[in-house]
Amino acid sequence: MTETRTLMGMTITVEIADTSASKDILDEVFAFFEYVDATFSTYKDTSEITRINKKELRPADYGEDMKTVLALSEQTKKETNGYFDIIAPDGTYDPSGLVKGWAIYRAAQLLEQRGMKHFYVNAGGDIQTRGKNNAGEKWSVGIKNPFNTKEIVKTVFLQNEGVATSGTYLRGQHIWNPKKRSEALTEIVSITVIGPNVYEADRFATAAFAMGKDGIGFIEKLSGFEGYQIDKNGMATMTSGFEEYTNAHA
């Protein structure tokens, strides 16, 4: 059972391979994404994050999920030596570099709570996998060529991992280096990170992209993570264990 909807400014697809999948379960997952959009969208005047940025809410008034995301963002900032920072160049909060992965992972947990064991959740190219697909095989995920998005440069096969890509090739310069806020990030155009779940992959992919050409080295040192980076000249660099994921039967 598969459904695709446009939410949070992107395409979200949920595919469940369990025979017990139902429309109600899919509706519940998409309702959660609608809630995330209504809470964390920096484009909505009524969202909680916008009201915080307008100084309409005090910390004591923040919702529990907002408190959680802000705390996770601060934790990620420390773990990445300051390269992950939700303070945007204009001084407002923008936690989108972490919220998407967090939301996908929460949606996956919701599916598990409903008894689903085989599924994937894809929001804007960031994906959480569980179990096997309808053919009883690992889920296959294509990494796009940032210079020609109709071309797949690598395919990885995942079973219970998350994968996230950070880059400027689709949305332009929307990621910043907190240490050099006025400089555009131009050394690399995309970095894809595979991790134990999509939340972890997403936050570290964002930080690694902000590091420029040094990002792939950061991922190499992270236990349980692999990465694939493409620079402005189209040269790819991958971590030492990345190729293991390109084998469908590994």
Image (cartoon, rainbow, N blue to C red):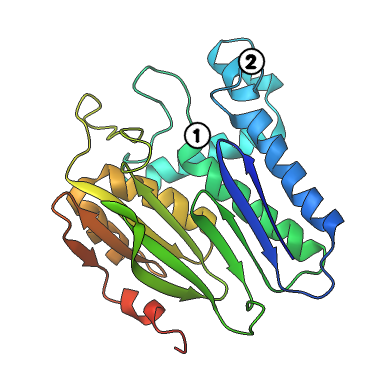
Residue type, numbered disc 1? Pro
| Residue toward you, 189 or 95 | 189
* Figure check: 135 above or below 169: below
Instruction: Give me the disc on residue 193.
Output: none
> For the point 42% across and 66% down, which residue is it?
142
Mark 1 or 2, nearer chain start: 2
For the N terminus, the quadrant is bottom right
> For the point 34% across and 70% down, which residue is it?
154
Residue type, numbered disc 2? Arg
Residue tagged 2:
58
The answer to whether residue 34 is left or right of residue 157 is right
Crowding at dot 2, Cα within 10 Å, few <14 / some 14-19 / many 20+, comes out as few
The answer to whether residue 126 is left or right of residue 34 is left
Residue 174 image point, x, y percent: 36, 33
Residue 19 image point, x, y percent: 81, 75
| Residue toward you, 106 or 148 | 148
Disc 1 vs disc 2: Cβ atoms closer than 8 Å?
A: no
The answer to whether residue 38 is left or right of residue 23 is left
> For the point 78% across and 55% down, which residue is it?
26
Residue tagged 1:
95
Is residue 105 at least partly visible in the picture?
yes
Q: Secondary structure at mark 2?
A: loop
| Residue toward you, 89 or 224 | 89
Q: Secondary structure at mark 1?
A: loop
Is residue 80 at least partly visible in the picture?
no
- Determine the CA span between mark 1 and mark 2: 17 Å
* Figure check: 15 above or below 46: below
Residue 35 image point, x, y percent: 72, 36
Residue 114 image point, x, y percent: 82, 63
The answer to whether residue 233 is left or right of residue 86 is left
